[in-house]
Image (spheres, grey):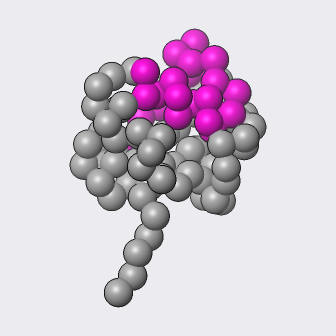
Amino acid sequence: MSITVRYFAAVREQLGPFETLSWADTAARTVGELRLWLIGRSAAHAAALDLDKGLRTACNQTLCNAEQALQDGDEVAFFPPVTGG
């Protein structure tokens, strides 16, 4: 089983465009658990994905919350809130 994690905007600048994880890498069963696991992965992940940053998340290109269940083949995205002007 695998999950693709995509990063956008400032998060992408810190971590790169994406990474693919296997269930052997993480036992996360929700988007929130995945984010916490990623935060513990490295200092760069901790800085980019800090819970106080207000990042938005999507699972399979649909906005979601931290309780969203993960399944094999899911694509999870992290991105800052969109602002306009």
| Residue 59 in the image, given as x and y percentages of width and height | 63, 49
The residue shown at (33%, 22%) is 42
The residue shown at (34%, 41%) is 48
Q: Name the quarter where the N terminus is drawn.
A: top right
Q: Is residue 44 left or right of residue 35?
A: left
Residue 82, above or below 69: below
Viewer can see residue 60: no
Residue 4 forms part of the magenta stretch? no
Q: Name the quarter where the C terminus is drawn.
A: bottom left
Picture mark count = 0
| Residue 78 in the image, given as x and y percentages of width and height | 48, 49
Q: In this view, does 84 lie to the left or right of 74?
A: left
Outermost residue toward the top in this view: 24
| Residue 54 in the image, given as x and y percentages of width and height | 48, 53
| Residue 53 in the image, given as x and y percentages of width and height | 42, 49
Which residue range is magenta in the image?
18-40
